[in-house]
């Protein structure tokens, strides 16, 4: 539980590059971390395994994997409703079929419940509004709106303990995110980003997430450690 001598925070940890970096930044800021990973009916388990590796690397106090199957209510390419698109332009205004309806709202609501139970006021999430695929729930105005909701919807908020949602990556490019993480000593070989890995967990190299990751490492002038042994 929280105390005057301890700063604690929840990090939403997917096993991907961004959430791992957000956790690394939180740790560097002096927070002791609780990690929350949601198994939401995604079509592969690689990111769940990666979240365990990331949680161990970050030295979190506790890592919860919460199973909430969204496949029946949140149709998306990531929940198997359609094929994952490959080699598509990613600099368009169109929201892609990999968008999972209300996913960040659901995830942040779960984190909010745990935060109130633990008595902590800080949640870290690795959303990004620049080098990303155009998801509406990754925008700064969405985060501000959720913070306002949290103040109204919880006992802690009504009593003056407002939730703060930290989005340290929201205005960074993927290359800047990677550079920041490397400076913090993060091992990106532990992470998984691909939306459509093969049966052995190897990334496809052609989905939006793979393309953005490759672009980020190239612009950072670094090799992607997750690809070295694949």
Image (tube, rainbow, N blue to C red):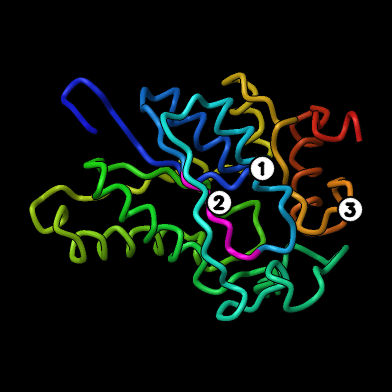
Dominant SS type (magenta):
strand
Could you say where residue 132 lies in the image, as x and y percent from the top left? 65, 56
Whether the magenta-drawn stretch holds residue 38 is answered as yes
Q: Which residue is mark 3?
A: 199
Could you say where residue 36 lies in the image, as x and y percent from the top left? 47, 46
Question: Which quarter of the rendering shows the N terminus?
Answer: top left
Write the residue at 55% across / 80% down.
73
Q: What element does badge 1 sit on?
A: helix
Q: Nearer the viewer, mark 3 or mark 2?
A: 3
Q: Nearer the viewer, mark 1 or mark 3?
A: 3
**Along the line of sight, which residue is nearer the eye, 149 or 230?**
230
Whether the magenta-drawn stretch holds residue 42 is answered as no
Could you say where residue 109 lies in the image, as x and y percent from the top left? 37, 61
Q: Which residue is mark 1?
A: 174
**Along the line of sight, which residue is nearer the eye, 54 or 65?**
65
Write the residue at 66% across / 33% down.
178
- Asked if marks 1 and 3 touch (Cβ < 8 Å), the reply is no
Question: Badge 1: how crowded within 10 Å, few (<14), some, or many (20+)?
Answer: many
Q: Is residue 213 above or below residue 187?
A: below
Q: What element does badge 3 sit on?
A: loop
Question: Which residues make up the magenta segment?
Answer: 36-41
Does label 3 or label 2 sit earlier along the sequence?
2
- Asked if marks 2 and 1 touch (Cβ < 8 Å), the reply is yes
């Amino acid at each position: 539980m929280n105390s005057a001598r301890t700063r604690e925070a929840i990090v939403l940890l997917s096993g991907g590059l961004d959430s791992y970096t957000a956790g690394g930044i939180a740790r560097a800021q002096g927070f002791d971390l609780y990690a929350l990973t949601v198994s939401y009916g995604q079509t592969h388990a690689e990111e769940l395994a990666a979240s365990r590796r990331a949680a161990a690397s970050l030295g979190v106090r506790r890592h919860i994997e919460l199973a909430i199957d969204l496949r029946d209510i949140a149709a998306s390419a990531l929940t198997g409703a359609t094929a994952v698109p490959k080699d598509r332009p990613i600099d368009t205004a169109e929201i892609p079929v990999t968008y999972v309806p209300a996913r960040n709202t659901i995830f942040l609501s779960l984190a909010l419940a745990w935060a109130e139970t633990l008595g902590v006021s800080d949640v870290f999430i690795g959303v990004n509004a620049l080098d990303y695929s155009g998801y509406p729930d990754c925008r700064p105005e969405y985060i501000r709106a959720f913070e306002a909701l949290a103040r109204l919807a919880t006992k802690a908020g009504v009593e003056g303990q407002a939730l703060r949602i930290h989005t340290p990556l929201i205005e960074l490019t993927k290359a800047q995110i990677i550079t920041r993480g490397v400076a913090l000593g993060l091992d990106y070989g532990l992470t998984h980003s691909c939306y459509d890995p093969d049966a052995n967990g190897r990334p496809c190299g052609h989905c939006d997430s793979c393309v953005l990751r490759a672009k980020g490492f190239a612009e950072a002038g670094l090799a992607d450690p997750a690809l070295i042994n694949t």
